[in-house]
Image (cartoon, grey):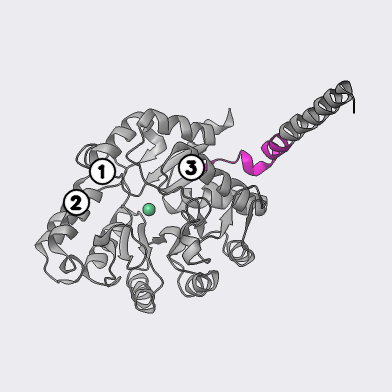
Amino acid sequence: MSLLTSVRRAVTSFGIVVLALLGGPASAQERPASVIPIVDVHFHYMPFMRPDALQERMQKNNIVLAISAGAIGGPAIGDPRTRDAEVLQLLGESYIPASGAGELYRAERAAGLSLFTDLQSPHRADALARLMEQKYAGRRAIPETFPNAENSSVDPLRRRRVPTDGPFFQELMKFAVQEKIPLPMHMEWHPDSVLQLGNLLRSFPDGVVVLSHCGKITVADDIRRFFEKHTNVYCDLGYRGAPLATQESTRDPNRMIYWPDGLFRKADIKPDWLKLITDFPDRFMMAIDDVHSWGQYDEVVAAIRFGVLDKLDKSTAEKVAYQNAINVYRLSPGILKKTDK
Ligand SMILES: [Zn+2]
């Protein structure tokens, strides 16, 4: 082959590669799932984040509102309350801060399991009173709670199972009903926890529980059976997709239920979960949960858009992306307006 021929071939194949690169993502951009607004109902403001960078990322990804499940705090970066407040200051109506995340954590560290089980716990009374006091311009969320994280928390303090219908959750649920806001729970699907959650949901028919990441260690059939029994329970689909669930799914393949386009596979969702979402289109919402870089944030959004929303019909995709969140969290439909531009 002459030098000229090789150069021509190289140029041609380069052109094909360029066209493929341009053609691939461009056609993906035209899919409705790539532009639909998303409400993120379970978000942790992480130590590496700053409010202006979060705002930029949300705008870039068309995340119209984020609901805090508790900002991550620490001695060097500040209390969860202060950190959530600084995000609120910049993001305004695009952010709902969580109340009492730091107070609940410190109370558990001081009181241990008695925080959840003792009928009279001074630590609980104090922490819940502080949680109830914290209100930001009339809006707030209850932070993620951990009734059962015995095998699923990186934090040793939370690797325990406490009664989901015990005094702690009864009191918190009463508050949730009063405030008309949901109670988020990170709960492994242990039979005792499931039974106790059923009791709680029956005792508070006006209360709403959102299962963080649709429970932990759950399969679609578990949730189907539970949804059939209880109407006041919903799921967020945070931390069930790649890349966040990738590591967990090496131990338990059930953890990951959707994923974005990758080198060796196309974006998709497991069929039994797709069927569950299609059968219960009013019960699911999307969530980003905790990411460790902005690159990971973008990947999570890509998994949500192309692994989940793109696989649903238009009406279900709209419900799961934002409408269910508007209904469940009583948000103003005005949050969608900024996407009309
Ligand atoms: Zn979380």
Tell me the CA gap for discs 1 and 2: 11 Å
Category of crowding for the residue at label 1, using alpha-carbon neighbours closer than 10 angstroms: few (below 14), some (14–19), many (at least 20):
some
**Amino acid, disc 1:** Gly
| Quarter of the image that includes the C terminus | top right
Residue ranking furthest to the left:
122
Query: In this figure, which residue is indicated by the disc labeled 2?
Result: 103
Q: Residue 311's quadrant in the figure?
A: bottom right
Query: In this figure, which residue is indicated by the disc labeled 1?
Result: 73
Tell me the CA gap for discs 2 and 3: 29 Å
SS for tag 3? Answer: helix
Closer-to-camera residue (100/20): 20
* Labels 1 and 3: the sequence-earlier one: 1
Specify start and end residues of the magenta stretch as a single range. 24-38
Q: Position of residue 173 (x, y in %)?
A: 29, 62
Closer-to-camera residue (140/67): 67
For the point 30% across and 45% down, the residue is 72
Magenta highlight on residue 31: yes
| Quarter of the image that includes the N terminus | top right
Q: Is mark 3 within 8 Å of ligand 1?
A: no
Q: Position of residue 106 (x, y in %)?
A: 17, 53
SS for tag 2? Answer: helix
For the point 33% across and 75% down, the residue is 196
- The answer to whether 315 appears left or right of 132 in the picture is right
Does 212 sit above or below residue 161?
above
The reply to whether residue 137 is visible in this rendering is no
